[in-house]
Amino acid sequence: MRKPPLLLAVAAVCTVAACGSGDSGADEAAGGPIAVKATDTGCEVGKTTVDAGTSVFAITNGGNKVTEFYVYAPGDRVMAEVENIAPGLSRNLHVELPAGTYETACKPGMIGKGIRGALTVSGSAPALTEDAKLAEATASYSRYVKSQTSALETKTTEFVTAVKAGKVDEAKALFPIARTYWERIEPVAEIFGDLDPRIDGREEVTEEGMKFGGFHRIEKDLWAAKPDISKDGPIADQLLTDVKEIVQKANAEKLSPLQLANGAKGLLDEVASGKITGEEDRYSHTDLWDFNANVEGSKAAIASLRPVLEERDPALVKTLDTEFANVDTALAKYRDGDGWKLHNQLTQADLKTLSDAINALAEPISKVAAVVAKKA
Amino acid sequence: MPWKMSRRRAITLAGAGVGLGAAGLAGGAALTRDPAPEPVSDVVPFAGPNQAGIVTPAQDRLHFVAFDVITKDRDKLVQMLRDWTAAAARMTAGRDAGEIGAVNGEPEAPPDDTGEALGLPPSSLTITIGFGPSLFQRFGLASQRPAVLEPLPRFTGDTLDAAISGGDIAIQACANDPQVAVHAVRNLARIGMGTVSVRWSQLGFGRTSSTAVGQATPRNLFGFKDGTRNLKAEQTDLLREHLWVQPGDGPDWMTGGSYLVTRKIRMLIETWDRSSLTEQEGIVGRYKGSGAPLGADAEFDEPDFTSVGADGQPLLATTSHVRLAHPDTNQGARMLRRGYNFVDGSDGLGRLNAGLFFIAYQRDPAKAFIPVQRSLAANDEMNEYVRHVSSGIFACPPGLTAPDDYWGRALFA
């Protein structure tokens, strides 16, 4: 995807709801952190009613699967999340919540809707103006990008470490997982020129004078008939350098609501053009991981815009909800343990069904940008 | 006409009456029945008692598409048929598919017309819809399925590919400009996303039949005139007897409609081309030059099935195509043929992937296409040079006449 034009440069103004998630330790809510006991089958949240303001959740993963923890506003708008909590680990999540109803979710195995619970925040907060709603949309999506980039850096580091240590099986297992975080936010990554092709370029799109590197170069070596990654050290190092650079840039980027809308569509275009065909991960055939990540990323962008869309075009929101659910249902058939079936295990008829579901979603999503751009 | 004029503007200038008539439908529900004062020469009226695109003088180009219905929601399907009807009315009048158009919308929104027909004339575009037997297994339509709307039987020698056969809904788009026909199919497919999914589609580049008395008989890729004895638009009585479904034939919603049979017939071009002229003419039963039946002088002369040649054999071999397909050998069976030549590039063996996309309309396939094809499949010497690779049958409802009509309204009532 090309860089979308910055037609609506709405700065990510900090509103009451938008700031302070994550790293401010000073204003923890009275009463200490809310304990969250996450297991492979449960998600026990210490409190289900809190006061408006900052809440801190302390999530402990007592299960055997890597988990995630989310706080969702209605429509699965991510208010805060923490990714990649390995078994046995604890992580704290700070989130500033205005009054309203929310849901908490643990996602053992990092997949699906997760184990949900209700969360009520009491107190008062003024209703957002139209502009504030747009600002909140971008702020909300920025939070999402931050959580994804953080996990991307962690998982790419693990992947690169495995490659450099010559651990083929471990690297193979980490490849689709690291890419998941990349694929969820790829439209953001695409803003930064050369970095995207360097990290994610395929062999045939490598420009003249540029060496084939990044994820797919290592993928090619890992899935060769006789895997040989002994010479991939420098490529792996460069990949990590590039990922770190893009993480830093993505976190600093101020996105416009229109970019969110175009990004949501762009992610589905990625699915329609690259994943359905199996050309993205042609050596590993792990395209369905990327497919799912693209859809999740698209959903996150739409969720951020949801308050604006609900006000301006509720029928469109309803259609999107239905079609996202249809895509999830269609894709769920190919779930395999904690991962996905390989692209080459699907028949042409299977792929056609998935393609139809993506088209049915992408057409209404292509209408979101104009709704967002519309002057109130 | 100046360049860069919008398609809509061009049409409005060219024929306001037609433009207004279509606009009524485009605007929502109303199909205005005001007779267009002076139809633009290359606009075929969309509304009428029978669907356009059947007896309409055969245009030069075809884009045919078959859809599978992928929704389970009957209302969603009906809404799509309404949207399709409005878009088809606009496009056949030479307008954009959507109400806003290819270039007049908001810059952030994808245009509601894809734009490749901007600046092109209406090009006699017709868009004809048909419903396949498989559709009637769902949406509570079982009782509405005409008894004759059954999947075609297997014929000897069939080498059908299921992936390019059948379908729940068919759209035949014919125009004198290939881009206009493709534009129509592309926009309908886009409108249908989430409701229907394209199962297969076929381009045709040269008509192989004439459907009006004034039209010259064209040639198929064997180099022979095809469709000489076709039903013609002017033969009103014959059309009533052989083409249009009559009251009492079946469910009321089909009265005034017609049954469409499609067959993609691959021709083995290279081997045909090295057969002798005598063999070719013997197989077809006509002279390659004039199109006259063997032993006759002119194209439209009746074939003489009784005369024998010097060798004592019939001039028109019992295995010749013209004899086997003739009404006299098929209890008077007649069809309106409307096929197109196709070339889908070349195959991996360097052979032209080409042939005839056969299209025939009829009142009752059990009395027309099926017995004729059974006879051809069993006996026609031409079979050595053809392979039937795709097959379809569709019930095409009558045309739209009421102001609030849409495709399938009577069926889904």
Image: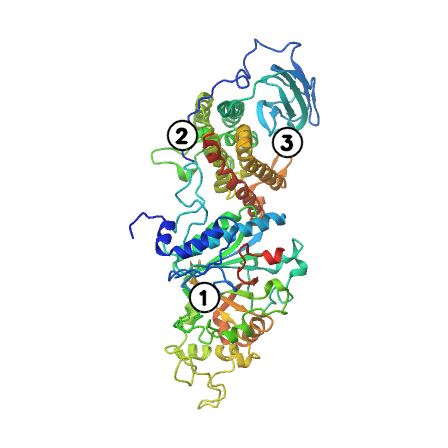
Residue at position x 39%, y 30% from top? A194
Q: Amino acid at mark 3?
A: Lys
Q: Earlier in the sequence, mark 3 or mark 2?
A: 2
Image: A294 above or below B77: above
Q: Secondary structure at mark 3?
A: loop
Asked if labels 3 and 2 share a chain, the reply is yes
Q: How many marks?
A: 3
Q: Nearer the viewer, mark 3 or mark 1?
A: 1
Disc marking residue B56: 1
Tag 2 subunit: A
Q: CA distance from mark 3 to mark 2?
A: 34 Å
Q: CA distance from mark 1 to mark 2?
A: 49 Å
Question: In the figure, residue A336 lies in which quadrant?
Answer: top right
Q: Secondary structure at mark 2?
A: loop
Would you call the spot at circle 2 few (<14 residues within 10 Å), some (14-19), or many (20 or more)? few
Most extreme residue toward the left, as rendered? Answer: B2
Tag 1 subunit: B
Q: Which residue is mark 3?
A: A113
Q: Position of residue B210 (x, y in %)?
A: 43, 70
Q: Amino acid at mark 2?
A: Leu
Image: B58 above or below A349: below
- Check whether the beta carbons of the residues at disc 3 and disc 1 lie within 8 A of each other: no
> Foreground residue, A149 or B395?
B395
Q: Which residue is mark 2?
A: A7
Q: Is residue A291 visible?
A: yes
Asked if labels 3 and 1 share a chain, the reply is no
Q: Is residue A153 visible?
A: no
Would you call the spot at circle 3 few (<14 residues within 10 Å), some (14-19), or many (20 or more)? few
Q: Secondary structure at mark 1?
A: loop
Q: Position of residue B136 (x, y in %)?
A: 64, 58
